[in-house]
Amino acid sequence: MKTNTIAIITARGGSKRLPRKNIRSFCGKPILSYSVTAALAADCFDEVMVSTDDEEIAAIARTYGATVPFMRSAATSDDFSTTSDVLREVLLAYREQGKAYAYFCCIYPTCPLLRPKRLREAMELLSDYDGVMPVAAFSFPPQRGLVIEKGLLRPRYPEYMQKRSQDLETMYHDAGQFYACRTEAFLTAGTLWMDNTYALLLSAMEVQDIDDEADWVLAEMKYKGAHSLRDVVHLHENNVENTGKST
């Protein structure tokens, strides 16, 4: 298990498409709480903190067990600040306090499908890599994507349109859940996209981007479905165990 590690959950107050998205109720709890709970349950971080500019978000974060040792600056709270900007600010602020974490994991506040074991896997992989990024395969080959020009459909890549899907190279996208990094490698590169970054492959049921109301509904459906399946598996395991006992 890695030591000298910190989980940094980035949760600013502003959200244009889904107002107050980071603390909106998701299946009965603030969506932020799922990221905090997953990080704590992973049991691989010395500290789980939330970077925010919003007092209500800070209060909810503390309620679920995260720390908020300082508030995010105005410079990293606008619509133009990047995740890397926020992380650099947090890591350097800790250094000013005499805390220099060797490894960190940036976790987004809207990933209720995040599983603690994925965080543990990622942090262990930092023994061999500068960064770990969870990814998922595109459900449809992007090489066969279409564009609309003056109301008419056009293939973006005509050379691939007659090829079978199984003959096209599998492509992946950022799962939008977390990034695990060696701190020095990140500070030197200035970006989460480093050359020595390992791809941690997730299934489609573990991933759901949440940008609008439809995404939110799909995320809740996946969450409920995953937990219903776990309940069925748990019940089956208990039945098997009880069947083997004498009465």
Image (spheres, grey):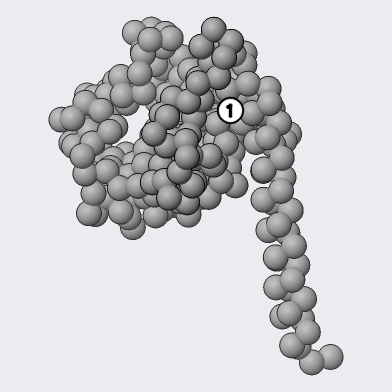
Q: In this view, does 218 lie to the left or right of 163?
A: right
> Which residue is depicted at the point 73% across and 79% down?
240
> Which residue is depicted at the point 72% across and 80% down?
241
The location of residue 126, given as percent across then percent down, is 27, 50
Height in image: 239 above or below 203? Answer: below
Q: Name the residue under label 1.
A: 210
Height in image: 27 above or below 168? Answer: above
The location of residue 225, given as percent across then percent down, is 71, 48
| Residue 44 can be seen, yes or no | no
| Residue 25 can be seen, yes or no | yes
Quarter holding the N terminus? bottom left
Name the residue nearer the viewer: 233 or 76: 233
The location of residue 208, given as percent across then percent down, is 57, 36
Height in image: 35 above or below 17? Answer: below
> Which residue is depicted at the point 74% across and 88% down?
244
Q: What element carries label 1?
A: loop
Name the residue nearer the viewer: 43 or 196: 196
Quadrant housing residue 49: top left
Q: In this view, does 73 lie to the left or right of 53?
A: left
Q: In this view, does 18 lie to the left or right of 44?
A: right
